[in-house]
Amino acid sequence: MRTEIATLGEFGLIKRLTEGIKLENKSSKYGVGDDAAVLSYPSEKEILVTTDLLMEGVHFDLTYVPLKHLGYKAAVVNFSDIYAMNGTPRQITVSLALSKRFSVEDMEELYAGIRLACQQYHVDVIGGDTSSSLTGLAISITCIGEADKDKVVYRNGAKETDLICVSGDLGAAYMGLQLLEREKVVLKGEKDVQPDFTGKEYLLERQLKPEARKDIIEKLAAANIVPTSMMDISDGLSSELMHICTQSNAGCRVYEEHIPIDYQTAVMAEEFNMNLTTCAMNGGEDYELLFTVPIADHEKVSQMEGIRLIGHITKPELGCALITRDGQEFELKAQGWNPLKEEK
Amino acid sequence: MRTEIATLGEFGLIKRLTEGIKLENKSSKYGVGDDAAVLSYPSEKEILVTTDLLMEGVHFDLTYVPLKHLGYKAAVVNFSDIYAMNGTPRQITVSLALSKRFSVEDMEELYAGIRLACQQYHVDVIGGDTSSSLTGLAISITCIGEADKDKVVYRNGAKETDLICVSGDLGAAYMGLQLLEREKVVLKGEKDVQPDFTGKEYLLERQLKPEARKDIIEKLAAANIVPTSMMDISDGLSSELMHICTQSNAGCRVYEEHIPIDYQTAVMAEEFNMNLTTCAMNGGEDYELLFTVPIADHEKVSQMEGIRLIGHITKPELGCALITRDGQEFELKAQGWNPLKEEK
């Protein structure tokens, strides 16, 4: 079944996609349907705003990413940015630009993923924009959230001797991507061949359906811990550590042996003949939380499930370094985004 | 001078573009540089959020739109949506995706336009996202604003006998577009030929550098008028009137003779052999305000400069109609966006 978008038109498509959306949060006063959405936040809250723009062929590849997963992920990565400020996401706007290749059903799939993510995280879709593109799909999501005025955590508050903590494990999403890219090449041109991903489900899940660490933010709050600095790991641990250290005017030492890595990630790195630590340090798309806490919180954080202490903050003169298992120091390097690399 | 974006990288480019940005509004607490921006609004304000996504080849044509103008317009059209809620824009986020065709200098031009618009309207750039695209330029802007809690104006409050008002004049931006498209075809392949736009400056300005009607919102506030419904005219008067009537469960009568049209628009329609009223009713991109006021405000609005009374709200059963100069009634038709039409 394929319904051409032209048969519905812009307003019809928006109506179809946003049908039955109910606003769940008290702060969401008026959603889709006017020139702007209307929000109402109490004055003891700070309002957090984050946004990103995902382009087909650069940020996602529809040959192996199902549209529903794409929608889910596009929403969740924005929630992750709000949690990384020690906040709670409340609203998103969703803008789509699509070429004629896409049908109404495709957009329903994408929206189903977005709406599922919103349900899971109790976030309201309050607006957006739908229009056409000459080629490919573009998705822009803006997320609005809240935090208590005295509890917002920035990247710039890390202090010497603070402990560096990471949630979950690293490198799996990157290995999932390698796996999908390999199968794509292997299966090129062959239809109806289903690759066997047995034993690699975790890697695929981390790549295709990441979650934001709402649970960690809640645990920290319950334990009465306000991190001195925090961010989410989207570009890779190495790059994010450098952001925190630069903005906090500090240095850091992290220990290879403490970097949390899942078993499947290790097996896959072996299979691909890749350096496991490099994958974990620079892989990206983990959407785990990287944060620092005062050394006085050592006992509390070291007992928390799902959080690993990986190092500590130093004076800025010492720079940012990884200490390997055999005691060598390697200076960290940021990767970040490179248009030359991405536009093959 | 052309600096490749790859020489700066993502973080370098963001730094270059956002350098020297100062936050002007009290509600802008923390801008570019963290996982999310932080805003602080007093509880007596509602917060307004609007967003759009502009795609090269669909929403703009860089063969005749200078990048600086594009940036200015991309920001201003979002401000217009906030004014249309009877609010004041305060912050924007700017997301860009660009192909290798664009240089650092190109992006500086685009940003110069965005920053100029922000200066003119006292809006802060608080964040965004910069990444690459396979082809073309995509710009997504989200605007956040504020309004007094009891003064937000929706589309759904128009009541029978309310007067329908329009600011400025209509159809000029559309005629400007026709003019630019014509010159583009005429001059195809010929370099260094400068088309003569003498006497048509207003049409070009309306298309290339529209303004949002901040002044009208201020005038209404000064006159103590809170419209019963309001929206900005981006898709064309016809389509917007129908939105207001549908959402307000009302009908309307508007009078051809009262539709405000500039002299240059009329001359150009004649030259193009187009129906002038159709251009004004369906042209779009006017970014004027369409609003309704109670009949009791008749004297006040009729004396306000730059506002024209064009008709009145009726019972829903009467539908939406235009009354021509010779007294005929024509049912209004919405145009809206059509992907088939735009993807030639």
Image: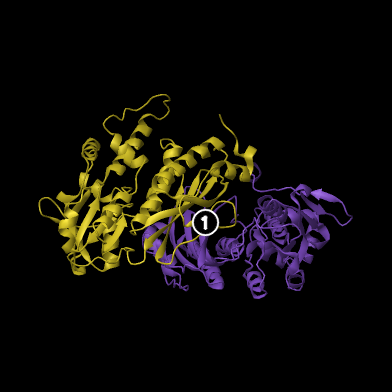
Chain colours: A purple, B yellow
Residue A243 in view here:
yes
Q: Is residue B44 depicted above or below B184 in this figure?
A: below
Classify the position of the N terminus of chain B by image quarter: top right
Q: Is residue B7 depicted above or below A16 in this figure?
A: above
The residue at which mark 1 appears reads as B29
Q: Is residue B243 left or right of residue B105?
A: left
Classify the position of the C terminus of chain B by image quarter: top left
Residue B310 in view here:
no
How many numbered discs, if any? 1
Q: Is residue B301 left or right of residue A344?
A: left
Q: Is residue B337 depicted above or below B226 in this figure?
A: above
**Residue at horizontal 65%, vertical 51%?**
A247
Q: Amino acid at mark 1?
A: Lys
Quarter of the image where one finds residue A326: bottom right
Q: Position of residue A283 (x, y in %)?
A: 71, 55
Q: Position of residue A132 (x, y in %)?
A: 44, 52
